[in-house]
Image (cartoon, rainbow, N blue to C red):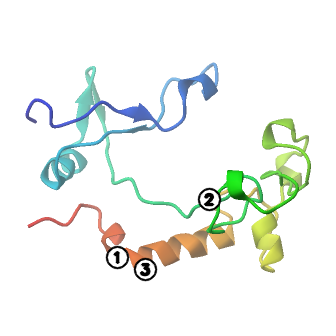
Amino acid sequence: LGSGSVHPGRWMRDIKHWRADQKAGHAVFTVVDRKTANLIMKNGLVVQGKRLLARKLEEDPRRCYKCQFLNPGHTADQCPSIAEVCPNCAGCGHPAGACKATAADYKCITCRKMGCPYQHAAWDRKRCTMFMEAKKELRRKHPENNYRFFLSE
């Protein structure tokens, strides 16, 4: 790769939120063009002597972090909901950090309102029916996301 073809990266989750024993995390890098991105995704990237795997960063459905609804057309600072809804237990009046619910007690407010199975947290990407449906809709609107590599000429 040429000098300047990969811009400085950032961690997906801020280091201050890592567990004490955590030794690895996901990072996002921006590159100068699709050809460079495809080359890195095909061959990997070596950072400080360690080979890293790479993939496209796909857009996720947006979620309001106050009412927890997917694609609501607003963000938490403009949310019309009076009370904050916990993403873990779907209870009102406390943030996730103060939630006392265990995983067995998790509930998804979005799935519950839509009549889907809701015994999971609102942030559970693998079990949330509404998240998976919204993700499917994004892929339908942006078919290029179905490909492993970026389309190029």
Residue nearest the observer in this picture, 134 or 77: 77
Q: Residue 65's spot in the image, x, y percent?
A: 70, 52
- Whether 65 is drawn above or below 96: the answer is below
Q: Is residue 24 at least partly visible in the picture? A: yes
Q: Nearer the viewer, mark 3 or mark 2?
A: 3
Mark found first going from the N terminus, 1 or 2: 2
Amino acid type, mark 1: Pro
Q: Secondary structure at mark 3?
A: helix
Mark 3 — residue?
A: 140
Using the image, tell me which numbered label, if any, was put on residue 143.
Answer: 1
- Whether 73 is drawn above or below 106: the answer is below
Number of dots carrying numbers: 3
Mark 1 Cα-neighbour bin, 10 Å: few <14, some 14–19, many ≥20: few
Mark 2 — residue?
A: 125
- Whether 17 is drawn above or below 75: the answer is above
- Label pair 3/1, CB-CB below 8 angstroms: yes
- Give the CA separation, mark 1 to mark 2: 20 Å
